[in-house]
Amino acid sequence: DDEKTFYKEKIKRLLKQRDAVMVAHYYTDPEIQALAEETGGCVADSLEMARFGSQHSASTLLVAGVRFMGETAKILSPEKTVLMPTLHAECSLDLGCPEKEFSDFCDNHPDRTVVVYANTSAAVKARADWVVTSSIAVELIEHLDSLGEKIIWAPDRHLGNYVRKQTGADILCWQGACIVHDEFKTQALTRMKALYPEAAVLVHPESPQAIVDMADAVGSTSQLIQAAKSLPNSKLIVATDRGIFYKMQQACPDKELFAAPTAGEGASCRTCAHCPWMAMNGLKAIAEGLEQGGSQHEIQVEEALRVKSLIPLNRMLDFAA
Ligand code: CIZ
Ligand code: SF4
């Protein structure tokens, strides 16, 4: 409608004026992903967002995602201005792993290598030996396990348990969870599978183990999009944020996609498989971020902290390269 068109045109104009490019996560709303594509930006998982942003020639990055993604962009590209639609787009994994408590936890287990998920603050990353995303978690832990290392894993307990099961590594897990993936329910999923017996079940490993156990394919967002393409099934039940449907449907236009159920029959869910913080990245907020910048929108990471958190981040990027 008119208002949307107005903001889209405004965003396009501001991107040019500011020499800015949009980097959007798969979990943002479809119109945001479409706009990022249309304007020469990228739609990706957090690893690819970080890479794209640091390699792009634009002097300003507009990060449509959650705060840790903006921070990661700034850590990798200190010379760039990093803007976000709102600095209040949090993540329950980041919030559930405060730096002081986490640092004490690590101090109590000095014999363990510290591996933290990308979904953490710069301060938590700075305390870590490695940063990791779900797309390379199993590979990296396999590598560290083969070197005989014992691991601290933070913050997602489901992903930590999944990686432990896959690799057999000695993993001590921080007990965080993603409020979106934690909502998927096995009983309701069982009923949905019975309704669509020909469907394959795709699951992100931030989901509870009982859900992962029901999966035909388990993986990060980009891996699930790949699986959607390569599996022979014409129907897919997807247990991750429903924002992913935009790119997944592009990848396999002829397949029918169903959101995995997030609550028992009759009960209402808190998030309905959509991250409330990702949902803050609306057109109006993006236009505001680009227009106003400043302390309401610009990501700042203090230099000493940036340099420290860059070390485990670069290790990840080198390992994944
Ligand atoms: O759940 C998230 O926030 C994910 C999957 C982030 C990422 O790595 O892209
Ligand atoms: Fe964090 Fe979950 Fe939202 Fe991803 S979907 S940003 S893990 S709360």
Image: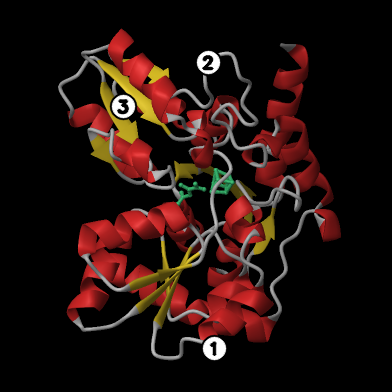
What's the amino acid at mark 2?
Glu
Question: How far is disc 3 from disc 1 in space, using C-alphas?
Answer: 45 Å
| Three-letter code for the amino acid on which mark 1 is drawn | Asp
Q: Quadrant of the C terminus?
A: bottom left
Quarter of the figure with residue 238? top left
Residue 315: image quadrant is: bottom left
Q: Can residue 162 be seen in this view?
A: yes
Q: Residue at x 52, y 83 (%)?
A: 106
- Confirm if mark 2 falls within 8 A of ligand 2: no
Q: Name the residue under label 1.
A: 107
Residue contact at pointers 3 and 1, CB within 8 angstroms:
no
Residue 85 appears at what percent x and percent y?
73, 45
Residue 147: image quadrant is: bottom left
Residue 54 location (% of width, % of height): 49, 63
Q: In which quarter of the image is the N terminus?
A: top right
Q: Which of marks 3 and 1 is in front?
A: 1
**Mark 2 and mark 1: span between their CA atoms?**
44 Å
